[in-house]
Image (tube, grey):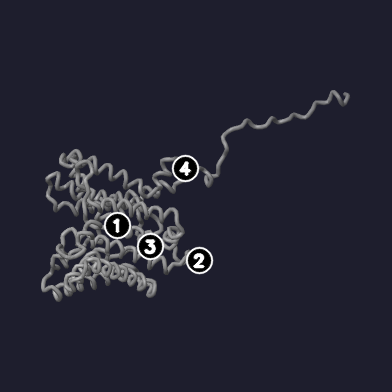
Amino acid sequence: MSMAQQAEPAVTPPPAPGPKQSDGRTRRRPLALRLLARPEVGVFLGAVAVMVFFLITAPPMRDGSSMANILYQSSVIGIMALPVALLMIGGEFDLSAGVAVVTSALTASMLSYQLTLNVWVGVIVALVVSLAIGAFNGWLLVRTGLPSFLVTLGTFLILQGVNLAVTKLVTGNVATDSIADMEGFDQAKALFASSFDLGGVQVKITVVWWLVFAALATWVLLRTKYGNWIFAVGGNKESARAVGVPVTFTKISLFMLVGFGAWFVGMHNLFSFNTVQSGEGVGQELIYIAAAVIGGCLLTGGAGSAIGPVFGAFMFGMVQQGIVYAGWNPDWFKAFLGVMLLGAVLINLWVQRQATRR
C-alpha cells in the first residue's frame, strides 16, 4: 500500500461555542440582589407599605396639611438621626443625644434671658457647649477604650441631672422663661423654626434643612475621603489605623457631629415654643437610634447610608401622626415602633444573607 493511500489521522473538530463558564467568583449577581444589597432599599419599601396602609385606614392623612405635619415630625427626628447614623456606621452610638438636645436649648435660653443678651449670643454659646459635649464623649472613648454604651450612658445621666438642677437653681422652676420678646429672636426663629407656604400648605423650614443635611451626608459618605474613613473605622479600626486612617480624629469628629445635630434641634425647639422644659429629651435617643437601624445601619458598624435613616425617620413620622389621624389610642405608638424595629432588623438580616449568597 502506498503512502498516499494510508488513512490520515482523524482531526477532532473544535467544540461548538457556548456560554462562558464562571467559577462563581466573577459571576455577576442579578440586578434584584444587587438592589437588595443597598441598605436603604428595604426601608424604602417599608415606608411605602406604611404610607399605603395609613392612607387607606386614616383618610385625614390624604390632606396636604396632614402630610406637612408628618414631614415636620419626620424632619425633627431625621435631623438628629443623620449624625447618629454616621456615628453608627463608624462603629459607635450615643445614648446622650436626646438630653443633649435639651441641654443646648437650656444653655441658649438661660444665658440670653438671665444676662439680657442678644439671643444669638446664647445660640453661639450653645453650639460651643454641644460640640464640647460631643468632643468629650469621643475623647473619653478613644482615651479609655471603653464601649460607647458606657461612656454615653454616663454622659446621659450627667446631662439629665444638670439640666434639671441648673434650671431650678437659675430660674426657680423646671422650665426656662420665655425669650420671645428679646433682641434677635425673630431672626433666629426665621432660621430655625419658621414656615413657608407651598401650594397653600404651611411647611416647616426644618423639612428643608432635613433634606439639605441628608444630601450633604450622602455626598460626604460616597464622595469624600472622610466618608471612606467612617466606613473603615466602623468595619475594623485596627486595620483602618494600619493603612493610615486617622481613627482618633474620625471618632471624635463623629461625636461632635451628633453634638451639632443636638444643637440644631435644640434651637428649633427653643424658637418654636419660646421656652424649654428641663426634663424633656429622655427616651428620644432611642428614637434616633431606631430610625438609623430601621434605615439599614448596623449596630456593629461599617455598613449603612444616609438615605436609609431619612426613610426611617419618615416612617416614624407617619406612624406617629397616622395613629392619631386613624383615631386609634396613641398609647399603641411605642408598640408599633417596636414591631417596626424588630421587623427592620429581621428584614436587614434576610437581605444581607440573600445579597451575599452565591
The mark found on residue 91 in the picture is 3
Label 4 vs label 2, nearer the camera = 2
| Lower sequence index among marks 3 and 2 | 3
Q: Give the Cα separation between the discs numbered 2 and 1.
A: 29 Å
Residue at 64% x, 32% y is 15
Look at label 3 and name its amino acid: Gly
| Lower sequence index among marks 4 and 3 | 4
Q: Position of residue 87 (x, y in %)?
A: 35, 61
Label 2 sits on a secondary structure element that is: loop
Quickly name the residue at label 1: 81
Residue at 16% x, 59% y is 273
Label 1 vs label 3, nearer the camera = 1
Q: Give the Cα separation between the discs numbered 1 and 4.
A: 32 Å
| Lower sequence index among marks 4 and 2 | 4
Look at label 4 and name its amino acid: Arg
Q: Residues within 10 Å of mark 3 (few under 14, many from 20)?
A: many
| Lower sequence index among marks 1 and 4 | 4
Quickly name the residue at label 4: 29
In the displayed orientation, state which residue is furthest to the bottom. 169
* CB within 8 Å, label 2 to label 1: no
Front residue of this view, candidates 5 and 133: 133
Label 3 vs label 2, nearer the camera = 2
Q: Is residue 198 above or below residue 14?
A: below
Look at label 1 and name its amino acid: Ala
Q: Residues within 10 Å of mark 2 (few under 14, many from 20)?
A: few
Q: Position of residue 329 (x, y in %)?
A: 12, 50
Quickly name the residue at label 2: 244
